[in-house]
Amino acid sequence: MIENILHNGQLLAIIIRSTHNEPGITFFTPENFSQQLAFMKHPPGMGISPHVHNPVQREVIATQEVLFMRKGKIRIDIYDGQRNYLESRILGDGDVILLAAGGHGIEVLEDAEIVEVKQGPYTGDRDKTRFAPVDRKLVRVGG
């Protein structure tokens, strides 16, 4: 199952549930995203030709990150670019989310192991602006 979270026509996040099982290669992101996210399912004997990635200069303005839920359960709160809370989702074992735009916060609901991938190099305090989380009474879990 794939879920695109949109707000005012802008793609904020893509969730790929652990149950997604489509054969072949499926790209979920538009070509212009600075993070490209795909799922691959191939039978034995299938090959990907050996290759190297050519040096290509790219300009990255916005940081996009991917979270791979190895284990556990979290609630991810989605905000627009002006820090307004929109909605939340629960992610569990094997789920993946691309956080493409806007803001986000996380509450760990069960012991969690998460792998994060995002552009670098990390610039410390210049890399993010922190703000107050949504009041728990206002949380709306969708999806």
Image: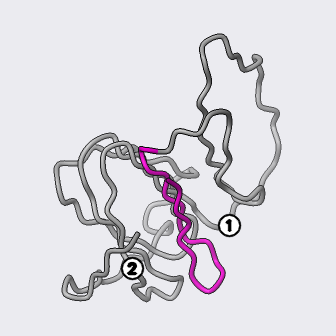
Q: What residue is rendered at 22% in x and 59% in y?
A: 108
Nearest to N terminus: mark 1 or mark 2 = 1
The quadrant of the picture occupied by the C terminus is bottom left
Q: Give the answer, above or below, for where 10 lies relative to 65.
A: below
Q: Which residue is mark 2?
A: 87
Q: What residue is rendered at 25% in x and 54% in y?
A: 73
Please state which amino acid type lies under the numbered disc 2.
Answer: Glu
Q: Which residue is mark 1?
A: 61
Nearer to us of marks 1 and 2 is 2
Q: Looking at the picture, how far across and down is residue 112, in whole percent?
A: 24, 48
Q: Give yes or no for residue 131 being in the magenta stretch.
A: no
Q: Looking at the picture, how far across and down is residue 125, in whole percent?
A: 43, 67
Q: Which residues are magenta?
A: 1-19
Q: Give the answer, above or below, for where 93 lies relative to 75.
A: above
Q: Looking at the picture, how far across and down is residue 110, in whole percent?
A: 17, 53
Q: How many marks?
A: 2
Q: What residue is rendered at 24% in x and 47% in y?
A: 72
Q: What residue is rendered at 50% in x and 83% in y?
A: 80
In front here: 24 or 120? Answer: 24
